[in-house]
Image (cartoon, rainbow, N blue to C red):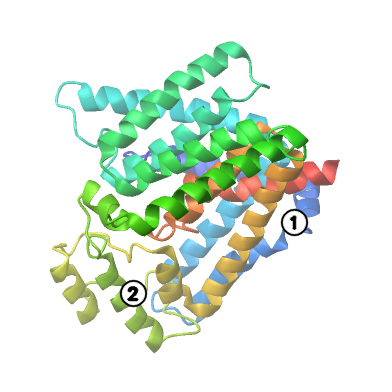
Amino acid sequence: MTFVQFSFDELLLYPLTLYFTWSAWKNQKQIIALLRKAWILLSFPLWCLISPLWAAEPFTAFKLALYVTLTMLICFQAATRLTPRQIMHAVLLATSIIVVLNLLNIYGPGGRATGIFAQKNTMGKNMVVAWVAASAVTLDPGTLRRYRWAAAAVALLAGYTTLLSGSATAVLLVIGTGLITMFGAAILQGGILRAGRMAALCLMLGASLGTLTLVLPYSRIDPVEKMLDTFGKDRTLTGRTGLWAYAEQQIAKEPLLGVGAGGFWRYRASPVVKRIYEEYYKGPRDVFNFHNSFYEIAVHQGMIGLGLAVLSALWALGQVLRGALALATMPQIYFLAQSLAAMMRTGTEADFFQPFTIFHMLFWIGALSALGVSRDR
């Protein structure tokens, strides 16, 4: 249900919310023990909780703050109750069902190009989650062989569906995470500090740098321009740079505190928003954003909120990277690939730190899992 929204899903989501709240209370000792080492992850949710004091839409800001806090609480709960491999398998199970249903919807009678998703970007994002989990399980020696073969099939279907989405960001993430996962399985898994692996790594880096040194000075092809042309994009990234200019103007007006969640995109109350909607061919009922997580956070939570979000992300990324290098298991490499995908996507999409977004929840869960495993050892 965190992958696909559907009509009346709140009838299931609200009871699940109550269950997770009760379960977290029951498991509070383990959560508090983990919280002592990972308190920084609650800094941004706490900032959101006090933001209604100055927000343009206090009720909306408070509701979103509660959702963000609950989302982080669920991440703590998952990290304390499940092993990294169990989390990886759970994600694969859920996404496998979604991948199959999505393909059946695309190619079934009256199928839609975006399948069961409302937009191509949403479909691409969720297919990336499925791809990362499936490719990691395929290469995981700790998983039974028959499940690894099933995961390989899901990975192929997820990769194919990502291509169907036409989302440039999603396609690039599939390629990037695939390379990271294969590199992790071949070099990082089991420990990198071995003579053979260090030699292979140095050889790979030397060959890559040598090739670039020889080719780039004589190349007349702009790789960025070529990549944008491939996906039908231009230097403005489909108008994103214009949106960012509007965001910078708003940040200059409310630099420290921002306008609070829901305080900017108010069509009826803001002439600027009306102008943006007209320029980007949006209707009054459409939901829009700046297509950049850092701009979106800075506008609504101010530079203080942005600073807390960036510090949380850097801390989490450090924990995930340490887990992949020190623990060197396939589940930790999976979290590394998923986390890097989440961070790369923040530059073109605005849902970082949005509540109940599994794409980023796995980032926080991965950091907490790496911290929890090392603490247990």
Q: Is residue 321 above or below residue 243?
A: above
- x 42%, y 44%: residue: 173
In the rendered view of the protein, which quadrant contains the C terminus? top right
Q: Amino acid at mark 2?
A: Phe
- x 46%, y 54%: residue: 213
Percent of width and height locating residue 47: 58, 72
The residue lying furthest to the top in this view is 146
- x 14%, y 26%: residue: 110
Mark sitting on residue 35: 1
The residue lying furthest to the right in this view is 377
From mark 1 to mark 2, how far is it between C-alphas? Answer: 33 Å
Mark sitting on residue 151: none
Is residue 17 in view from this perspective?
Answer: no
Percent of width and height locating residue 33: 81, 52
| Tally of numbered discs | 2
Tag 1: Cα neighbours inside 10 Å, few (<14), some, or many (≥20)? Answer: some
Q: Is residue 146 above or below residue 119?
A: above
Of 357 and 168, the residue lying toward us = 168
**What residue sits right under mark 2 in the picture?**
264
